[in-house]
Amino acid sequence: DKGVVLATWMPSRESNDWTRAACRKHPDRFIPFGHVRPVDDWRDELRRITQEFGWTGLKLHQGELKEGGPDMLATARDTVGEASRLGIRIVKIHLVDYDAVDALSRDFPQLTWILPHMGCYGQWQEMERYCRLARERANVYLDTCAVHAYYLFGKAIDWAGAEKITFATDGHEFSPLVEKAKIDTLRLPTPFRTPRIGPADYDLIMGGTMARLLGLSPA
């Protein structure tokens, strides 16, 4: 098994050094995503992770983007524009702002966008809206990490399509075993969920789609 690893909430260079060290320790298991924050020399760090390390995935977080000025959308545009130019292909962005995510994913169609927490951390009532964006826009995907309203996952699969949802954990703040159990539960009959997901959909969510996006399996 393989998985994407990354670090955030620390200086850009430090976080990427942590990720690089982990991937060197487990090269057969870990796939690195980089991270930058606007208060650092993010342009130089983007060049380092793409040109020196060869990484093609990037994590951005609204809690850090807001430090780049009053207009988070403008900060995100600058960052992903430069990232795309340098070879980043996948952006995992925590930005709970539907209009901003809609605009970014529309204006940068060459990038694959993955929205953590089903796109709507703390605004679970908005989950359907983000799911339908993922269904309608080819380059938008969702991940399942740290979703407190996991009882909506059954409906979310109907709204977005299983092929647009990817498993993630937000470990180690959230236990990977608990996060996996939220998906495993969808295979069981309960009176609170939509019909059980089958093996094909389960496999897509638990790694099939992410493997395709990472180029580890046929398109």
Image (spheres, rainbow, N blue to C red):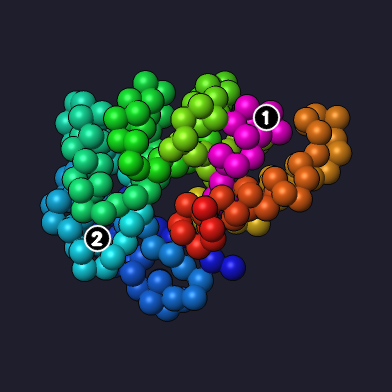
Residue 136 is inside the magenta segment: no
Residue at the (50%, 62%) spot, across then down: 216
Rendering coords of residue 45 (x, y %) = 18, 57
| Circle on res. 158 | 1
Magenta stretch bounds = 154-169
Residue 158 is inside the magenta segment: yes
Write down the residue under mark 2: 50
Rendering coords of residue 211 (x, y %) = 53, 57
Alpha-carbon neighbours of circle 2 within 10 Å: few (<14), some, or many (≥20)? some
Vertical position of residue 219 compared to residue 27: above or below:
above
Q: Main secondary structure of the magenta part?
A: helix
> What secondary structure is marked by label 1?
helix
The answer, for residue 151, to whether it is visible in the render is no
The image quarter containing residue 79 is top left
In the drawing, does residue 161 fall left or right of residue 13?
right
Which image quadrant: the N terminus? Answer: bottom right
Residue at the (35%, 28%) spot, across then down: 106
- Count of picture labels: 2
The answer, for residue 205, to whether it is visible in the render is yes
Vertical position of residue 11 compared to residue 63: above or below:
below
**Given the image, on which type of amino acid does mark 1 rest?**
Asp
Residue at the (17%, 58%) spot, across then down: 47
